[in-house]
Image (cartoon, rainbow, N blue to C red):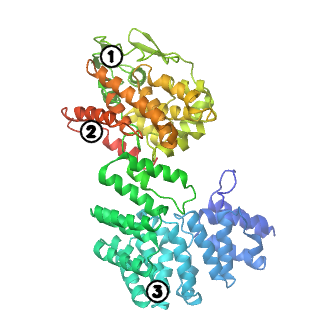
Amino acid sequence: MPEGTDDPALSATEELALARLALDEGDLHHAAGHLASALAQAPTLPEVHETLARLATASGGGLDLFPINHHTFVGAVVARAHLLAAAGRPAEGLELLAAATAYAPGTQWAGVPWVTAPELAERLTPEHIARILMQVCTALPDPVPRAGQAALTPYLTLAHNAVTVHPEHGLLLGAASALARRLGEVALAVRWATRGVRAQPSKMGEVWLGYAYRSAGRTRDGLAALGRAVELDPDDLAIYADIAGTLAEIGRLDEALEWTERALARDPSFDCAVHTAHRLRHLRDGDLAHLVALADFVRDHPDDSHEHGDLAQCCRGRPWLGQLTPAGGPLVDAMRQAVADDDNGLGSAVRLPAAAPPSAVRTATSTAPGLRIDVVGTPAPDPREPRRPSAQRLWHYADNVPTPALPAPSATAVERIGQIAHPAWPHPPAAYDAAVGLAGLDVADLLGLLVHPPAAPANAVGRLLAAHDPSVWVRGVQVWACLGLLHHRTDEPWEGSTRRRVLLDLIWDVEDWVTEAALFALITAAWVDPSVRPDVARVVADRLADAAAVARVRPVPIAVSLAHLALAAPELDPATAALATELLNARSSQLPRPRNPLRRLWQRLTRHP
């Protein structure tokens, strides 16, 4: 169901006026098109339905004016649904309305009298109504957010009417319970599911009852119902995974893992059990290997029956697994304060014991030009020099002032990075997949983005970052530009590839936010390609060891982030993992700030990228 044409949308009132004009002139096809557009915008407007009835009268029912094919506009689907109901074929009409609801659940497609009339439940079989309710449920989250519930209440009214007519139909009662549960009517869901199991005991009835109990907070009763479902059908392994997930939610992790093992003993490749098992194992011991194994399973089984959110759930909000880390250091703190005060840093100064990361300096001077930066020392090793000889230099220095050593990226590169860059992602493989949109950019453009990051876009995320922490946007651009490098010449074998060579140059260049971004790209490569994991693990170990050694003699603003990165790397050796933990523990043992001014910002940014 496409959205329609690329023409500027007219209002429902304008579309209705044009439909009436065309109808008066006998141009039924144009009238039908305008009515479909009006219905798409105002599906419950009485005047639209009155005009649709006129069209039906003028055209012998009007069904031929709204044919169904693979690319039918949603408004035409809804128009045909109403015409079918008017022609005495409400069952077919209701199926089309349910399809429209699956396409756009937030629109009140079914909010019309013929759907909520008690007579409809009397004309349809209970099996057909149950199927419609289940069709609607499959398109809905559980629960539906409060703002989206009103559009779906006509289906709940239909369920009420149907249950009144067919009070002992188990399948109908279970499907009605599933809809009521999603719409927040938990007590009603329990009541209907209980009646359904009592009237017609079945596996699905027990599952619906178990879900209803669980939503009502009656976990023990819910587990009992799901256990009865297993007894009725021991081969339905999805129920095992549901039981395991429920047990884990209440802290009974050992029992939860026992259920996943029971499922895997029956079918080691069953997707629901595999996803749940890896998530729960990671929850038990925190070992990253479980998440990497889950990512490998997802890659090797692209045809799973449905999407799972276990990997994203485990990575959400975690440094580098699901989001970049906020930049650290006194310069960035001073910049954030200047942005919060909205004074461009006038009259403010920050004293630094050594040159700050060049990206931090460039971001601070562009967003708080009145902020004075005083570098009071040049401790060895000099942070303005690469950590290893590099074929690619990003920065030139005049004293402590960095300037880009590369030309600005093309307008195409700026446009693409603005569409993709975000400080959060579901998990590393998802970030890799999303960065494919940068595959067409050449290396020069991607490197140019690192030192000439474009301004944040004029959207909600961009405005939020500009008002609170511009460094997050810059770091996000750098992360995604480095992920774009992973897609450069992927036909080249890894060891001698351009993408590996360029990323290594960036990792060993001067200490900078780019170091972190490039290391994350390498780690992401290891997530998606097991063959490169030993190589990446060695690079991570070497880079972290170097940062730790330097940190013993002078501050290294990126050291903590590098430690988080190391702990996100597959197949990391135990000694490096211990070093990363040591660096993080040393940071946490320092006096904490009275509050975290970025916590709320991160919560808003990382909900759903």
Q: Is residue 538 left or right of residue 256?
A: right
Foreground residue, 582 or 435? Answer: 582
Mark 2 vs mark 3, CA separation in Å? 53 Å
Circle nearer the viewer, 2 or 3:
3
Q: Is residue 75 above or below residue 279?
A: below
Secondary structure category for the residue under label 2: loop
Q: Quadrant of the N terminus?
A: bottom right
Location of residue 25 by image quarter: bottom right
Location of residue 143 by image quarter: bottom left
Quickly name the residue at label 3.
170
Q: Amino acid at mark 2?
A: Asn
Foreground residue, 257 or 3? Answer: 257
Lower position in the chain sequence, tag 1 or tag 3: 3
Quickly name the residue at label 2.
596
Quickly name the residue at label 1.
372
Foreground residue, 209 or 550? Answer: 550
